[in-house]
Image (tube, rainbow, N blue to C red):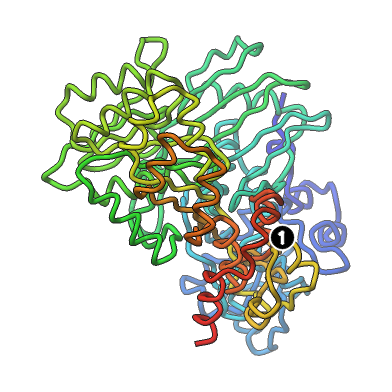
Amino acid sequence: MQTPSQNITSAWRKLRNHEITCEQALKTLVDEQGNVALKLLDREVTYRFFKHFPDKNILPPLIPLLLWRGSYYLGSPTAVELELIRELSDRTLTEIKIIPVSKKSYSTWQNIQKIDSKLQSSSQSINSISREQEQEDISEVTEVFLSQSVDQIARIKTLIAAALRNRASDVHLEPMTEGLRVRYRIDGVLRDITKLPLEISRKVIVALKVMSEMDIAESRRPQDGRISEKYNSPEEAEQGMDLRVSTLPCVGGEKVVIRLLPRQNPFTDMNKLGFAPEAMQTYSGWLQQPQGMIIITGPTGSGKTSTLYTSLQEVATEEVNVVTVEDPVEYVLPRITQTQVNEAAGMTFAAGLRSILRQDPDIIMLGEIRDKETAETAVRAALTGHLVLTTLHTNDAPGAIPRLKDIGPDPSLISDALLGIVAQRLVRRVCLHCAEPYKPTEADLRVLGLDPKYANRDTWKRGKGCPKCFNSGYWGREAIVELLNVDETVREIIYDGSMTQLNRYLKEINFVSFRISAIEKITTGATTIEEVLRVLPLSTFSRNRKLSPSPTIEQFSSTIKN
């Protein structure tokens, strides 16, 4: 059976085969609003026209639509002068006829001409009409490339390349009754991109399983695989990518999620993690300690791995031996020995950590503490001359202490081993291209528990939405951080105190909680209250209302005013 790309015949070829008239071909290609059916254009017409013009910069914005009976039909979003039309006619030895088309159609067509189907991270395209940078229409560009793909593997590579160009971290392929829905996760939020026809949905999934070296005959149980690919980018001739593939049987077939991972860690600057200056100073001090344990907490997708890897690169010098045990290894880092959990072979976190301790390590990164044996071994390693970095799944920084005690290690050992705890979430930043002032309402201030005189109403911002941010109002992400420094008082509370005592002490020292960090981001215009509430539960702001207005917020306010 033929694939859809083979079934799509260009309007020009239908015209040549006398299936339609020239007038019908033009109506098929350009509607009344000037929108061009890009899938129905023919590459041969484009090639024949532009081969007459080695320097395309001298041309006005033109889309070759048809070549018929000695005439080129060219779409243009702007008026073309008669003198220039005569020059084009003389150069091509044909009659030139201009058809008005929309600026959006021309911009999309122009982007498609510039984009390499294996380009990993293209710089923004320049609009030849306005001479300004612009963002490609992801859905339209992806659909056009899909229509030109000759097989299922080409379709998969098209989807991955488009995801990489648009900063996506994951690609979701979801079977539905009408086809295979494709979604990209961009800045932590899923976006619908396109839908593959039902007749090829299963073929695409099977091809992806072949590329991932999975069992294509098994569709009743989940499977995991990996694909190694190289993509071109403007910065490097070729950059390696690891694609982590996961399948899940579901109603309608199998769902596939592809995690896109560059082989080299893109986070190399500690200052880009989003820590406040005071928090960064404290955290950097922990990393300089010869021994102890640092815990990073947060849910999946909160940036824990990026913080850990950036921290490891900061301390991985010639003088120290850095070893990790991870599940899985997501980025390959220089000067670091990285090992991966393989439970089927007996390589668990606990077994890996015991082996690492016989490898003369100075710094150990443990992907996650999951059980009592791993926790006790990690704590003892932190007490015997090793700096240990690890993660836990807790809602906030103080919550890591009862969680660790619940797993099993002796509280006295925990209190001696801990240097500090970092909890973090990732929030989307307000798009700089469409940011506009926003006046907070009384309801906004009530949610934050913020006194109006400390609200800095003149500095709040929100994005109204533009093509560069996919009309979301956000571009990029940064961290909201809650940092708990384990001082002598906290050590005593860990040993024989309660969470009530810990919370009371944190109130006394004006602990910079998630609430304080979030308010600072909102009142400086970095993000919005809606975005903060998307990643933090409302209870974060309902707790400790008596602290408002806090000295920390007052410091933020005076900083902004100055």
Q: Is residue 27 above or below residue 323?
A: below
Q: Residue 540, can we see it?
A: yes
Q: Residue at x 63, y 85 (%)?
A: 84
Q: Is residue 417 above or below residue 541?
A: above
Res 529 quadrant in image = bottom right
| Residue sitting nearer the eye, 287 or 342 | 287
**Residue 71 visible in this rendered orientation of the protein:** no
| Viewer-side residue, 241 vs 207 | 241
Residue type at mark 1 is Glu
Q: Residues within 10 Å of mark 1 (few under 14, many from 20)?
A: few
Location of residue 351 by image quarter: top left
- State the image coordinates of residue 221 (x, y, percent, origin top left): 62, 13
> Residue at 50% across / 26% down in the picture?
406
Q: Position of residue 242 (x, y in %)?
A: 42, 36
Q: Which residue is mark 1?
A: 530
Q: Nearer the viewer, residue 426 or 344?
A: 426
Residue pictured at 77% horizontal, 22% vertical: 252
Asked if 372 appears above or below 101 in the picture, the reply is above
Location of the N terminus (image quadrant): top right
Q: Position of residue 264 (x, y in %)?
A: 34, 45
SS state under label 1: helix
Residue 527 as seen in the image, left or right of residue 510: right
On screen, 127 above or below 541?
below
